[in-house]
Amino acid sequence: MKAFRHWSWFLLLVPIAFGLIRLRFNVEVLDLLPADVPAVRGLKIYQQNFANARELIITVRAPNPREAEAAARLIAETLSQHTALTAAVSWQPPWIEHPAQAAEFIAYLWLNQPPEIFGQLTNRLAPAQLAQTLGAAREQLTTSMSPKEIALLSYDPLGLTRLPPDPAAATPLVGDDQELFASSDGAFRLIFVEASEDLASYRACIAWLEKVKHWVQSCRNDGGLGEEIVIHYTGRPAFVAEIAGGMEHDITSSVGSTILIIIALFWWAHRRWRPLLWMLGLLALVLGTTLALGGLFFGTLNVVSVGFAAILLGLAVDYGLVLYQELLCSPHSSPSDVRRILAPGIIWSAVTTAGAFLILNLGGLPGLAQLGSLVAIGVSLAAVVMLNLFLPPLVRADATTLASLPSVPVRLSSTRNSRLSWSATALALAGAVAVLWRGLPTIDHSANSLRPRHSSAYATLEEIKIRMHRPQEPYWLLVGGQNETQIARRLDAIEPFLQRASTNHQIGGFTLPTALWPRPEAQSANRLAARRLAAQRESVGAAARANGFTGSALAFTDALLNVWQQAGTRAGVFWPTNELSRWILEKFTAQRPTNLYALGLIYPASNALAGPGAQAAYGAQDSNGPSAVAAHLPRDEVWLAGWDMLGSALLDVVEKDFWRVLFPMTALLLVSLGLAFRRLTEVLLSLFTLAFSLLCLLALMKLAGWSWNLLNLMALPLLLGTGVDYGIHVQLALRRHGGDIAETRHHVGRALFLCAGTTVAGFGSNVWSSNGGLVSLGQVCAAGIGFAYLTSTWLLPVWWKTLAGRKPRIEDSSPPGARGRPSTRDQRPSTPSHLYRADLWRLGLVAARKLPPRTCV
């Protein structure tokens, strides 16, 4: 039976191995957010359908336009030669590189025109009007002084590229327009590079980007690009590679710094290598197993969840510290005896701590919920591992010298005058109130907490906005439907509202793909006329030659008539398919097996869509600004999305769900405190300790310029679940020591200091994280726990002695035969075992992760 109990541990290797196989890391920021929020849903649709996941943008900045163009051409030609690496490379508009392909796209636009508009074209090309049309073109060629007009008429004498004004205004057509690829001064250029394969994982993105950078560097070395040519990268491959590198850095830096602090604190307190190394080994086991179980349960861990590692280390080490401290106090006790005494406190501590983190699942943010679940799993696992595996090797390895282990006493000066503590309390309260008199810490309504803190890809994107004179990103209006007709009708319904909004200056402008979107009814009505025009090919050519135009001047016309002839024989909706047409259409349209999407752009006149008013875009009534326009948009398959409005929409969700998190945590706290003390005064003192710590935290946030955001708002429930422990330990210790403050600090000071230090280190190590939200969460939690520890250790004893102090329930509680003997390191504490165990059970109900006043010094 005993052998089976040992072998049962090895059965855990099966789920652990399966979890490690399933484990993946997700760097998509949108997967951290609730999918049912319209702004998030809209952004996901945009990312999945309009943001090319394989497209990298390379920026080239040079001292003058000539050098910028030469550098962009060289890089583009070099990358396009490596077909195994790139599928397409564009450094100038495709209609300049492939002008002949424009015929298919323009033929498609003509087919989408209303039948009466297409009828006007048919009349213009009728045999009776054809000669007059060509004669007018010839006369314009001889009198025009515009090189662009002369070139266009030489290529298109029938004027087929002159579509009605609306589509021409909204569509990049054939010409020399470079605004999508170069700045107005020409010294800043963009190169669009599409990968030859799907970049499904972050490792694939990193590997592909490194290859691209290698060939770009070869252009610099071999092509003579000087150091004055500045090259940067942005786009999804660059973002993914950057965020993934940040994740790896977060894990190593936060975990490494937490471990170093644990080592320093343990060595300061105990000066012993064997238990320290064994504790670190078990912590590594807990961390690795939690990671594997996370892969088993979730499959994929997101960019925020990696912060669980350092937090878990700071919490899990507490159980080892408590067990080792008890072993020092009872060197002749067996591991089972120590486990029997401390198991209730550790188990209940793990339950309540895990519960506090599990409550994050009610917070509305999937990313933060996953972090809470991982910490809860790890804390529960740490309690089991430390209780069963930590002590036996230490006792067996060094049973003879355990009693003489050196222990550095905690020299805490006793508070001789309670006036000092009351003065410090009054001073702290007055200072906090003075700092907060003009307002509480602000609330960050942006989505910056979801972005990396230092990102070259984001900086490059901002440079593109400035250089291309687009300081504000447009907001994306996404329209979905199951077929072309549904979306066409929705676009027609939306356009009048946006026109009025633009006239009233509620928005700066808008672009709808109304002309680009296929019109099945118009195509059906125009097909017959298009076929008839294609059949007049010979007569058109004869008339052109009669008016002095050569065959090359009709090359574009022939290509366009060929498209009409093919489209006239097809059934269903006609979509153009060549490279130029796809390049244009994929910017505004998306075709999926079950859904179609159209993308419109809304340009804000100001920052009206950003900030607190952004949530009004989905229902709040606002008579002014773009939110009023958004309120009139159809709700069915229509989404308004943008990064600037994401923060407010999510903050609204978090604020609503915040109370769902805070109320259960508060209820658990009150029940635990009631069971622990059974005295209203002590319960109120614990609550006041938490409130005092929170007030100090708010003052610090105000002074440091910290703000509340989407992630660190969840620090408040965590602080309630973890910060209350210190006050509980101090008050119970004061009970046992008859209100002797110096003795209380002497006994519990080291245990509380070590546990608070490791917990603060676990949260605080996230300040090195690459994710801004995780940094703010770590800062707030570490500062709050630090204030809770300092308040409980230095101020609460005086408060307790003044307001709730009483004599100990047992005046002389020494075991029989122990009276008159001085207490030594080898002796048990003076409290009877049945009362001591009762206190431990009470501590277990209130998350007492630290050792009660059985700490030896």
Image: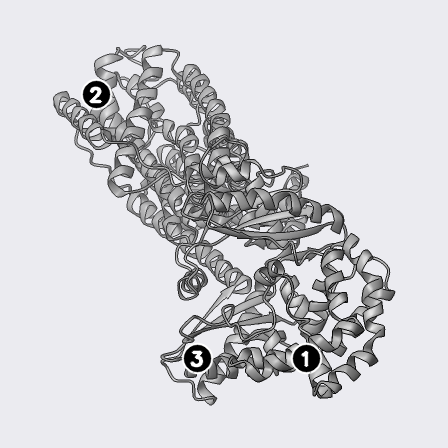
Counting from the top left corner in percent of width and height, residue 356 is at 48, 31
Q: Which residue is mark 3?
A: 68
276 lies above or below 561: above
Per the image, the residue denoted by label 1 is: 135
Specify the amino acid type for callout 3. Answer: Ala
Q: Residue at x 62, y 79 (%)?
A: 153
- Compared with 394, 363 (above or below) is above
Dot 3: element: helix
Q: Is residue 119 left or right of residue 352?
A: right
**CA distance separating discs 1 and 3:** 43 Å
Instruction: Look at the image and tell me whether residue 368 can be seen.
Output: yes
Q: Residue at x 17, y 24 (%)?
A: 426
**Label 2 sits on residue:** 798
200 vs 574, nearest the viewer: 574
Q: Nearer the viewer, residue 287 or 733?
A: 287
Depth check: give the residue in front, 394 or 191.
Answer: 191
Which circle, 1 or 2, is nearer the viewer? 1
Q: Position of residue 270 (x, y in %)?
A: 32, 44
